[in-house]
Amino acid sequence: MSATVAPADPLMANANIASPMNVFYFLLAPALLLWFIYWRISRQHMLKLAEKIPGPPGLPLLGNALELIGTSHSVFRNVIEKGKDFNQVIKIWIGPKLIVFLVDPRDVELLLSSHVYIDKSPEYRFFKPWLGNGLLISTGHKWRQHRKLIAPTFHLNVLKSFIDLFNENSRLVVEKMHKEAGKTFDCHDYMSECTVEILLETAMGVSKKTQDQSGFDYAMAVMKMCDILHLRHRKMWLYPDLFFNMSQYAKRQVKLLDTIHSLTRKVIRNKKAAFATGTRGSLAETSIKTAEFEKPKSNVNTSTVEGLSFGQSANLKDDLDVDENDVGEKKRLAFLDLLLESAENGALISDEEIKNQVDTIMFEGHDTTSAAISWILLLLGAEPSIQDRIVEEIDHIMGGDRDRFPTMKELNDMKYLECCIKEGLRLYPSVPLIARKLVEDVQIDDYTIPAGTTAMIVVYQLHRDPAVFPNPDKFNPDNFLPENCRGRHPYAYIPFSAGPRNCIGQKFAVLEEKSIISAVLRKYRIEAVDRRENLTLLGELILRPKDGLRIKISRRE
Ligand code: HEM
């Protein structure tokens, strides 16, 4: 028994001192010190260059982190206020992390038009459990390969086959909203459900009736998931997965992802089953059959269909503007049809990658558009004369028939409505911040921004530059009349980003918005209940107000 008590033998005592644990601790301290010295030296370049960039003073080690602690609203307000103080390039430190904000169109062009600075900032990794290696967050060869594959599935040639489904779902949401007539309600809930269901029936090609889960449940799970991701951005201690996984948020995330992924898994299962029987195209049924889209004469270039070009793509050709002659038969398939066909024909895309892309399109394709449409309904609700002008335009184009639904050509012709949509996205860009990780030093104005920095484009502020948009806070659709756009810097207005990583769904989004808004306005007069100046803005992944967007509707005679 006595042998198990404290060793009397000094040799045994020495053996304990040299136990593996003690050796580990003994070596850990110098290893950490060496690592710290190496880390400091490797950052000399960054620290030296960062010193020259203007920015608010910060605390040792923490930098400006304390200014970014708080509610989502206060953080967004701080970012916008700081931007006003400095106007051009501004740096802040969040602990060891250097962030540079850009709000000048020339600087934004330098970054976004480049094929070098295409990497998303490290915070996008929080999306991984949800979107895997989908288009939004992937980079390098995989991103290029998949972008090339997917971009043509949002070409106008494909979109024209969606018009009846856009119209059918617009009709349904107008019908659903009928029970709200005369009451105050949040229009965002309706728009979320409608935009999810449009995506299911168009890009995914399944019928919403065959999904067990409503578009609304999915949209709500997405919104709560975005809250968690945004919380991780704001709370530094939740950055490392180790700490996040121990928090209550990780458990909530697992449940939300289960709801989200169960919808996307079912979509793929349904579509695969149809595919196996040789069925291509959407499985959804529609009672609306609009007149066939007029096929353009062969010498007409469809690459810039007037009225559907936004920001940079209004002036430059990009991969979304593929000339009709370049688009092979295979590329005319809708999104999920094309992915399944590609997987069948070779190794371009695996099952897991298909799931990632479906999750990405379902998220990017509904949350952005539902926010944009809801903002516009609120803005129009405060401007009866602008509403009347849109309705006049619609009546003029559709011969005063408010019961039938517009063709693709008629949607294209709704130019004033388009100005309103553009103006809505100027004031309330669905994606208010775009972040890139700089993989190389970049010269911007008089400053060299070092590699390793996160470059943050503050779209919200860029769109409110009084030098570009006089009286920038006013809702003024005339800002987008052709004569007022002339000479405007192409990167001064970028709701869909710009350059090689711009939004692949922008034409889809504009057509969908036109279809829904024109359907709502044909039936209802809108009155804004919330005042813009009283709204608490959450500048999260998607720009939205804290308490929804409340309007009233009344039947239009
Ligand atoms: C009003 C509606 C929309 C707005 C304002 C919008 C805006 C944007 C912006 C700003 C980006 C760049 C994000 C970044 O670089 O961090 C983006 C990327 C993207 N968007 Fe949209 N979007 C909209 C609708 C859609 C729709 C309808 C789809 C698909 C159906 C879509 C699919 C995508 C995808 C896949 C990307 C990633 C592209 C890439 O990185 O190559 N978006 N969008």
Image (cartoon, grey):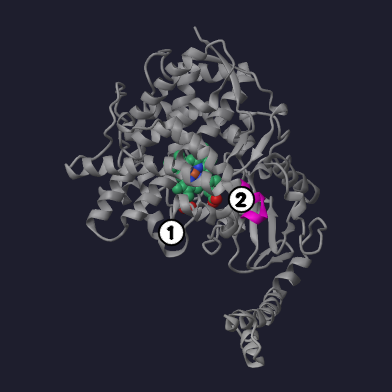
The label on residue 485 is: none
In terms of image quadrants, where is residue 304? top left
- What segment carries the magenta color? 231-238
**Image spot of residue 169 (x, y percent):** 39, 25
In terms of image quadrants, where is residue 10? bottom right
| Badge 1 or badge 2: first in the primary sequence | 1
**Image spot of residue 312 (x, y percent):** 54, 47
Within 10 Å of disc 2 (Cα), the crowding (few <14, some 14-19, many 20+) is: some
**Residue at position x 36%, y 50% from top?**
355
- Where disc 1 sits, the SS reads helix
**Image spot of residue 16 (x, y percent):** 62, 84
Which part of the image, by quadrant, shows the N terminus? bottom right
Disc tally is: 2
| Residue 539 left/right relative to 400 | right
Is the residue marked 2 within 8 Å of ligand 1, measured from its CB? no
The label on residue 232 is: 2
Gap in angstroms between the C-alphas marked 1 and 2: 25 Å
In reply to whether residue 38 is colored magenta, the answer given is no
Is the residue marked 1 within 8 Å of ligand 1, measured from its CB? yes
> Mark 1 — residue?
143
- Depth order, front residue of 416/160: 160
